[in-house]
Amino acid sequence: MNQLGQQLTICFALLMLWGSVNVAVAGPSGRQIYEEMMLNPGPYPDPALQAYIRELGQRIVAISEKPNEDFTFTVLDDPSLNAFATADNYVYMNRGLMNYMRNEAQLVSVLAHEVGHITEGHVDFMQGKAFGAQALAAIVAVLAGSNEVYEAGMDYANALTKGRGRDNELEADAAGARYMTALGYDPNEIIEMLSTMTDIQRLQRERARAAGAGRQTYHGIYYTHPRNDARLRAVVARAARADADVGREKGRERFQQMTEGLVWGENFQAKEQIPERWSNLQKRIRFDFPKGWQHQTHSPGMVTGSPGDGGASLSMSIKPRTTQTPEEYLYNQLNVSSLRDGKEISPARLKGFTGVVPGEGGAPDRRIAVIYYKLDAYVFNGNSKDLERFREFDEQFLDTID
């Protein structure tokens, strides 16, 4: 067995052990996830559409089992086909999913389904279980130092958390169908929506396989809503027979009005264009140099920025991380012999460390920082022509790094 095969075997063995233990690890709070979502990918910049989603969502909550609890509904500026719920009653809808809806009833069917996951108690347990399994996969990958181990481990960790997935989906479908019926919508629109999604995702998976890539699908990497599922049709039929006035129109006209101009694909126009911003789409990272600075990309993992007068420079390079702390990384991997004013930093809640490397032989001081993100270490170096200019620019170095 080659080295990668051995690493994968160890990773899967640890994950199988985790999967056999009925333990949930506390993951991030719903508010923490919300703050991250507001940064990346961010909310879709259409206040009227956001208000429309909130209105529909609150109508669902009002007739649910949790009518007195606060729920937060948000459309994310994300082209992928997904909707999901997190802890503390947060519900998200990707605009990409809305591109394939035909009417308001189908939109309500997805929102009602996500509310159902919350009212049925699925979110807290599955989020904790998924967080623990995925954290373990990341740890094993760091120890192995392999992106392939990371990707394979995450896939397997996701598979472990799907053990209750189909039952949970049916329970959420049943709850969603009840809510739709109570509001006067035809619950059969759930099946119409899922049939459309099945066709689209089958095509996307085929294209992804042809390109040698993965494709995230609605509710995770394994699609759990087969079109002809007898149990799904049974729960919808029961809701349709309930004593309720299923007389509301599908809402095609209002839905089309509210989604007029909805962006397809990547939303480049809606993003703020900042000249000082550097980004790497493959790594999904970005940061802003000080205002007025120019930057030059030397390679996908190396960029340098400087002000117009050239009196200073700030470079960033991407290196493989280790299991050491960022502070230990500075000393052991970057061979920093001494550091002044060292401190931990946490930009975007990541782990990092920064300090000043004293100049030797009359050379100016240097700002250095290491930030960990996934399997990489992002190393920043801030330099100036002389010590006085370093003092002038160091605050700008820190603003960029932290």
Image (cartoon, rainbow, N blue to C red):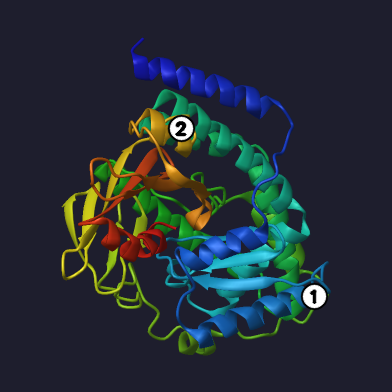
Q: Is residue 146 left or right of residue 211?
A: right
Location of mark 1 (residue): 63
- Rendered residue at 65%/54% (across/down): 232
Placement of the N terminus among the 4 image quadrants: top left
Label 2 sits on what residue type?
Glu
How far apart in space, not on screen, are marks 1 and 2 (Cα)?
A: 54 Å
Residue 61 in percent (x, y) is at 75, 73
Q: Position of residue 159 (x, y in %)?
A: 55, 36
Residue at image position (74%, 62%) is 175
Res. 396 image quadrant: bottom left
In the rendered structure, which amino acid carries the disc numbered 1?
Ile
The image shows residue 117, relative to residue 152, as above or below, that is below
| Picture quadrant where residue 53 is located | bottom right
User: Is 73 situated above or below 304?
Assistant: below
The answer to whether residue 162 of the structure is visible from this angle is no
Residue 32, disc? none
As rendered, which of 287 and 250 lies closer to the eye? Answer: 287
